[in-house]
Image (cartoon, rainbow, N blue to C red):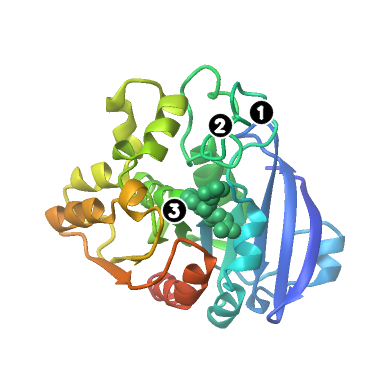
C-alpha cells in the first residue's frame, strides 16, 4: 500500500511527539486530517519524520479517540490532557477529524449537529451523503490500517474510546468490529441514538427514514442483540450528572440495561457536578487510558 501522509506539524510532548497529518483518504474521497501522539517507546525521531519515512521501530498498542459534535482532530489533542498518560503506558494515541470537510452535500453547513463536524461514525447510505460520509470505513479500515502499517501501531492491540457523538462511535465501532478493537470506553456517550434528537436527525440524514436500518448503529440495540459479552474484560463509561445533554440526548441507562441483559461487564460511573465538557473528560482521562493499557497489555 502506497500512502502519502503529509506531516502538517510536529511538537515534542512528554518525551514523545505530537504530530498532525493530512492525507488523501480513499474511504472518504477527500483530504482528511488526524492527530497522533507517538510515545518515546516508539523510538520516534524528527529526522525520520522529515524524510517522510515510517517513524519508530517498536510497535506499540494504539488507542483511537473519537471526538464529539463540532470537534476536529485538534480538540482532544489540546484539551484532554491525555498525552501524559499515553506516555506513561507507551500507548500511541490517534484522533481523527469528525467528518469529511467540503463534501458539498446539501445542508451539511446548516447546523452544528449534522453534516460538517458531525459525521456520527456511520457509512451513509442516502444519495446525498453516501459518497463522502463514510466515517465508519475511514476509522475502522483506513485509519486502523494507517495506524498499524505506516505508523508503528500493533494491529493486535488497538482500543477505541470517545466522547458524546464519539462515545457513540466507539461503542458502536467496537461492537461492529470486535476483531479489530480489543478494548472500549466512553465519556458521556450518545448511548441510544435511535431514541434521541441528535441521533434521529443524523440517522434520518445519513441512513434514511427506515428506522430498522438505524439499529445497526445504536450501541444499546447492538448490545441487547449480543449472545455473549463482546468485551468480557469490561467496558468503562464515565458520565457527569450536571451534563446539560444528559436527559435529552445521552440515555446511558439504556446501554446499562442492555449490558446487564447479555452479561456484558460495565463500569458506569456517575459523577456529581461534572458537565459535558473537556474539564470533565480530563479529570477521568487517566482512568480511561489505564483501562485500555490493562486490556491491551501495554
Ligand atoms: N455548539 C454547541 C455545543 C457543541 C458541543 O458541546 N460539542 C461537544 C460534543 S457534544 C456531542 O457530541 C464538544 O466536545 N465540544 C468541543 C469542546 O471543546 O467542548 C452548542 O451551541 O450547544
Could you tell me how far apart the alpha carbons at marks 1 and 2 are, in whole angstroms?
8 Å
Q: Is residue 22 left or right of residue 198?
A: right
Q: Is residue 148 left or right of residue 167?
A: right
Image x and y of residue 30, in percent = 70, 33
Count of numbered labels shown in the rendering: 3
- x 67%, y 57%: residue: 74
In the picture of the structure, the residue carrying the numbered disc 3 is 164
Q: Earlier in the sequence, mark 2 or mark 3?
A: 2
For mark 2, give the secondary structure: loop
Crowd tier of the residue under label 3, counting other residues whose Cα lies within 10 Å: few below 14, some 14–19, many 20 or above: many
- Do callouts 1 and 2 mark residues in contact (Cβ within 8 Å)? yes
Pick out the residue farthest to the top. 127
Q: Is residue 239 left or right of residue 103?
A: left
Q: Which mark is residue 133?
A: 2
- Do callouts 2 and 3 mark residues in contact (Cβ within 8 Å)? no
For mark 3, give the secondary structure: loop
Q: Earlier in the sequence, mark 1 or mark 2?
A: 1
* Depicted 33 relative to depicted 59: above or below: above
Q: Is mark 3 within 8 Å of ligand 1?
A: yes
In the picture of the structure, the residue carrying the numbered disc 1 is 103
- x 59%, y 62%: residue: 76
Residue nearer the viewer, 59 or 202: 202
Image x and y of residue 183, in percent = 39, 62
Crowd tier of the residue under label 1, counting other residues whose Cα lies within 10 Å: few below 14, some 14–19, many 20 or above: some
Q: Nearer the viewer, mark 2 or mark 3?
A: 3
Could you tell me how far apart the alpha carbons at marks 2 and 3 are, in whole angstroms?
19 Å
Q: Earlier in the sequence, mark 3 or mark 1?
A: 1
Amino acid at each position: 500500500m502506497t500512502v502519502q501522509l503529509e506531516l502538517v506539524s510536529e511538537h515534542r510532548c512528554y518525551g514523545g511527539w505530537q504530530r498532525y497529518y493530512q492525507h488523501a483518504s480513499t474511504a472518504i474521497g477527500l483530504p482528511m486530517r488526524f492527530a497522533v501522539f507517538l510515545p518515546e517507546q516508539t523510538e520516534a525521531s524528527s529526522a525520520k519524520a522529515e524524510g517522510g519515512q515510517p517513524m519508530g521501530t517498536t510497535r506499540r498498542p494504539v488507542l483511537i479517540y473519537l471526538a464529539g459534535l463540532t470537534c476536529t482532530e485538534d480538540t482532544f489533542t489540546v484539551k484532554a490532557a491525555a498525552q501524559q498518560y499515553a506516555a506513561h503506558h507507551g500507548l500511541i494515541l490517534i484522533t481523527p477529524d469528525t467528518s469529511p470537510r467540503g463534501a458539498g452535500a446539501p445542508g451539511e453547513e446548516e447546523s452544528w449537529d449534522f453534516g460538517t463536524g458531525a459525521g456520527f461514525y456511520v457509512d451513509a447510505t442516502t444519495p446525498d451523503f453516501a459518497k463522502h460520509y463514510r466515517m465508519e470505513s475511514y476509522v475502522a479500515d483506513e485509519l486502523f490500517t494507517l495506524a498499524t502499517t505506516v505508523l508503528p501501531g500493533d494491529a493486535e492491540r488497538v482500543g477505541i474510546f470517545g466522547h458524546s457523538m464519539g462515545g457513540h462511535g466507539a461503542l458502536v465501532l467496537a461492537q461492529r468490529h470486535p476483531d479489530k478493537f480489543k478494548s472500549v470506553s466512553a465519556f458521556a456517550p450518545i448511548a441510544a441514538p435511535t431514541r434521541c434528537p441528535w441521533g434521529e436527525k443524523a440517522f434520518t440524514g445519513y441512513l434514511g427514514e427506515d428506522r430498522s436500518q438505524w439499529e445497526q448503529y445504536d450501541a444499546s440495540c447492538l448490545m441487547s442483540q449480543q449472545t455473549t459479552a463482546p468485551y468480557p474484560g469490561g467496558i468503562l463509561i464515565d458520565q457527569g450528572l450536571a451534563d446539560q445533554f444528559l436527559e435529552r440526548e445521552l440515555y446511558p441507562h439504556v446501554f446499562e440495561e442492555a449490558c446487564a441483559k447479555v452479561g456484558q461487564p460495565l463500569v458506569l460511573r456517575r459523577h456529581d457536578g461534572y458537565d459535558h465538557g473537556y474539564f470533565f473528560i480530563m479529570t477521568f482521562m487517566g482512568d480511561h487510558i489505564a483501562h485500555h493499557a490493562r486490556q491491551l497489555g501495554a
